[in-house]
Amino acid sequence: MTIGLLKEIYNDRPRDARLMGLDIGKKTIGIALSDPAQSLATPLQTIRRTKFTKDINVLHGVIRDYDVEGFVLGLPLNTDGTEGPRCQAVRDFAAEMSNHPSIFGENPWVALYDERFSTVSADNLVDGSVNKRKAKEKGITDMLAAQVILQDALTALKNMN
């Protein structure tokens, strides 16, 4: 399994394949998908977390339906760039993915990418006419945060080539 910071594992990524961006929170997981050319990220959905096995079953449906071959997980660094308390939970989630090859693949590519300002950016994407609290309750903010994480990662990948 290839797990690591995007800047360290970018050469190993699946080419011409769809990537899934995940914003992993305590209560929800925001999901976004790239196009196969890995140039555009689109928000897809937010799932309410219950327990890991149920969470990955929902992810399995998306992975299967959209033929996902790689993953970008938001890494919640502190504003000074140090790892925050949620970073270990994201790393644990990534490591647990390797225990489910029937869902994530035999050797999934899992990139961790700095998500420091993704929720703020997602909030800014929500139109001023929308109640931000209701947007959060409906999961709009979480899937938009996943989109921001994935789009930023796709832009970084393009610049690394």
Image: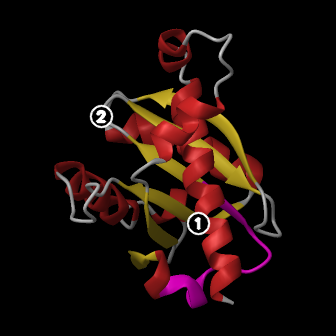
Q: Which residues are magenta?
A: 9-20
Q: CA distance from mark 1 to mark 2?
A: 22 Å
Residue receiving disc 1: 153
Residue under the image location 55 percent in, 63 percent down = 71
Colouring style: secondary structure
Q: Is residue 62 visible?
A: yes
Residue 106 left/right relative to 77: right
Depth order, front residue of 54/144: 144
**Residue 15 in magenta stretch:** yes
Which amino acid, mark 2? Lys
Percent x, y for residue 7?
48, 82
Q: Nearer the viewer, mark 1 or mark 2?
A: 1
Q: Which mark is drawn over residue 64?
A: none
Dot 1 amino acid type: Ala
83 or 56: nearer the eye? 83
Residue at image coords 29%, 55%? 79
Q: Is residue 106 above or below residue 116?
A: below
Mark 1 residue element = helix
Q: Is residue 111 magenta?
A: no
Is residue 60 in view from this perspective?
no
